[in-house]
Structure formats: C-alpha cells, structure tokens
Image: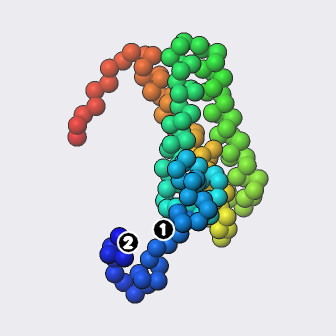
Amino acid sequence: LTPYFGRGPIYPIEQGFESKGCRTRSWWTSIFYIGNIVRPDDMCLNIAWYLHNDMQFHWIAPLTLIPFALGRKILSFLIAMLFVFVGIGSTLAILLYYPNMSFNDPTALTNNGDPSFFKSVYIKPWCRISAYAVGLLTGYIVIITGRQYRINRY
C-alpha cells in the first residue's frame, strides 16, 4: 500500500525502504521483539526499536513485581539495586566508548558524527531501562503507602 501514501520528487525512489528488512533474513527479529539487539541494521521498520524496548520491559516487569507482591523485601531491594547498577553501568559504557560525550555539552544528545551511536547505544534497552524502573518503583511506592491520588481531568 505504500505506493499510494505519498507524493514528491524522491518518493518513488525511496518507496519501500521500510520493508526492506522484512524481506531479508532478519524478519524473525520483529516477531520476537529483539530487532534492537539482534541485527539492528536490518530492522523490519526502523521506528520499531521503541516497540521492541517496550516489549522487553514488559517481559521483565513480572520479575520485579512478583517479589514486591509476595512481600520479599530483600529480594525487592536487590532487584532495585540491580536497576541502579544497570543504569550506572550503561552510563559508564557510554562514556567509555564515546569519550567525547559530555554532560555539559548541548551537542552530547546528538550522535557526534558517529553513525554507530544509534544502533550501539540509543536503541538498546539497557540504556532505557532506568526510566521504566523508576516508573515501576514509583507505582510500588504509591501502592504500599495506600494513598488515594486524585488526578484532575484538565
């Protein structure tokens, strides 16, 4: 259907770029939501890396929520610390492999001229898990405090 979606001077040339990875040998990575880890250059749909990350986070969420629900405080603490260490480790790995990145530099959010930054750092789940973990822990804190929060509609 993509030939009918657009118009423009380069549209016929670029038409079909999003499905090239689906026709190659890496179609199975999209089915199992691992395309951001295995063969990221041949993803079926390039923006699907975000879906892959979310699904991977949903897979590991029960590993963290079940100990919380069972009241195993030591195991819950160890899992929370694991998230902290993963966050620290991914930050150190980024600084190790991309030493020109600086937290004070506004251009640090770009790929600094290195095209491998996207596939080796940006789309990886271990660089994005910390925000998801903060959400899980915040939800747990809201549940154990027993408070009712009223959220206005507007």
Q: Is residue 116 above or below residue 131?
A: below
Q: Quadrant of the C terminus?
A: top left
Q: Quadrant of residue 143?
A: top left
Q: Residue at x 71, y 42 (%)?
A: 89
Quick check: can you spot residue 108? no
Q: Residue at x 50, y 17 (%)?
A: 69
Relative image position of residue 98 (x, y in whole percent): 72, 58
| Label 1: which secondary element | helix
Residue matched to label 1: 18
Left or right of residue 2, residue 77 in this image: right
Real-space Cα distance between discs 2 and 1? 9 Å
Q: Residue at x 63, y 33 (%)?
A: 83
Mark with earlier residue (2, 1): 2
Q: Is residue 22 above or below residue 50?
A: below
Furthest-bottom residue in this view = 9
Q: Residue at x 73, y 46 (%)?
A: 92
Q: Is label 2 in contact with label 1 (beta carbons under 8 Å)?
A: yes
Amino acid, disc 2? Thr
Relative image position of residue 149 (x, y in whole percent): 32, 24
Amino acid, disc 1? Glu
Q: Quadrant of residue 41?
A: bottom right
Q: How many marks?
A: 2
Q: Nearer the viewer, residue 40 or 97?
A: 40
Left or right of residue 20, residue 6 in this image: left
Relative image position of residue 81 (x, y in whole percent): 65, 28
Q: Is residue 140 above or below residue 49?
A: above
Q: Nearer the viewer, residue 135 or 49?
A: 49
Q: Is residue 141 above or below residue 119?
A: above
Tag of residue 2: 2
Q: Quadrant of the N terminus?
A: bottom left
